[in-house]
Image: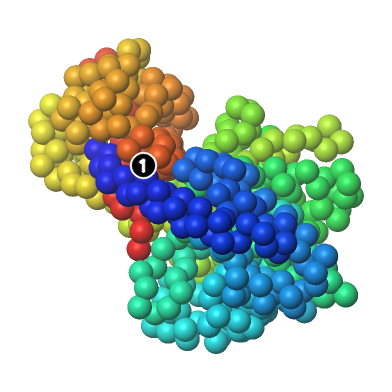
Amino acid sequence: MYPSKPNYLSLKSAIYVSINFLLFIIFAMDTEQKYWLPVIPPYDLQSDERYTLYLPARVNQLVQRVTEEGLQKTVNFITNDDRDLESFLFILSFDKPDCKGGNLLAYSRQKQFLNKTAAQLQKIIAPEKNSVIQVQEIFDNLISTALKGDTYRAYCWRFNAQKKIKYQTAYVHLMEISGKKYVMGAAVFVEAVPEHIILPHRVQTVLNRLGPESFESWLNMLDNDCDRELYFFVDTVTQPYRWIAHGGNANFIGITEKEAQRMIFKSYTERDYNITVIWNDLERVARLGGGYSTYAWRARPEDPVKLKLSYLLPFSYKKTKLLVGTGYTPLGIPDKLLISLPEIVQETFKLISEVGLDNAIFAVRKKSSTDRYIFLVEQELPYRILAHFDLGLEGKTSTEATIYVHENEHVIIDYTKLFSGMVDFAKTGGGFYSYEYKNSDNNFMVIFKIAYIKPLNFKGKKYILGSTYVTLDTEQ
């Protein structure tokens, strides 16, 4: 169900520690080192401290160096002598009033990146047509992120066209020097993008700006967003629903649900493409105090419809209840899930009406694969699992399933909590549902999954009928 990966990280960490120890001996007397973290960073880099403490510390010390020693000396140092092998520092300049453009002035230990434009870098690292790496878009998104505050952005990256494409997560800070703006950043390669860090932090960062800034200025900042994917939106929490800010499409602001429906989902009749249903789920999450919502979305009629994972927080302004959120299609989540997950659930409902529950589950199980499979759970405690791709889970209660996957698959997940949330969501009509688990074989890495669930009533009993997929390697 949850394939684990060999734990290469401990070996890699041991190598890093050995290299860093040698560097420490060689450079112990170097006064340059006052600007950087110790060569053996004082953080647990196999935990979330890698993002929450280590990356911000690297950026803070980069800013300190630029402030005290100047930009050019810092560029030379990080290009040639940056000794922290765990991450990469970069400096991005831009001189336009919005977040377009940008030149990469420096990048740790990568001389070929020195003072390159996005177009020049594209030829170096991703010259192939339709690459998932679009350097200009990455630059725009990093600049847009820094303009909103010190926070995170993820993207695909590599150092040359022969390297394997991997995910990077960066922490960025906006710095102004002699009237010019720069993005100071630190990035690490990751096996899975830490959405559980990125999305909540981005939302809280922009929400913290409300107060020091006027409400009108704050909304204007969110509206003028160059990030076409990870933009922000502000909605009313209660009906009649309205957007009062939308970084993806300013035409959404102030329009009704019916107008929004005609704008982006005019040709769709399915419930999963209903604006009111989507808004109802945002309201549900806001009532819970914030969290995640997953739904089909596109910001413009010409854009493809994709699954969107959003994180949102409720707040009040002059006694009006509002929510602010951001989200995107998680890297590593196949686009085909938008169609394939609802499709197998609908097929199963049809079979149940024709041949009964047991025969339908048996037939659909034959069609199941790692790409998509059906699961069936009783809606009442103790939440017994009646069907699952992992046969070891069938017949188990949520408590027994929690123990089983921990002992046999090294997965940490609370099935009782998961199924309780799914039951509440199914009572609203169901749809796409996101959840997370940790893999103890992989340094407790948090991984998001998306399921599609519907309530099922059959012969007086209530179930959750859902579909999801086996989590595979997240690298490209």
Residue with the most extreme top position:
381
Please state, as top left, top right, bottom left or bottom right, where the C terminus lies in the image: bottom left
Residue linked to disc 1: 442
Image location of residue 284, percent across then percent down:
58, 31
Residue at x 76% of width, y 64% of height: 65
Amino acid tagged 1: Asn
Image location of residue 404, percent across then percent down:
25, 23
Specify the quadrant of the image occupied by residue 314. top right
Q: Is residue 418 above or below residue 237?
A: above
User: Going by the image, does 14 lie left or right of 42?
Assistant: left
SS class of the residue under badge 1? Answer: helix
Asked whether 301 or 217 is in front, the reply is: 217
Residue at x 37% of width, y 73% of height: 163
Specify the quadrant of the image occupied by residue 344. top left
Image location of residue 54, percent across then percent down:
60, 48
Dot 1, how many residues are within 10 Å of its Cα: few (below 14), some (14-19), or many (20+)? some
Image location of residue 76, percent across then percent down:
67, 77
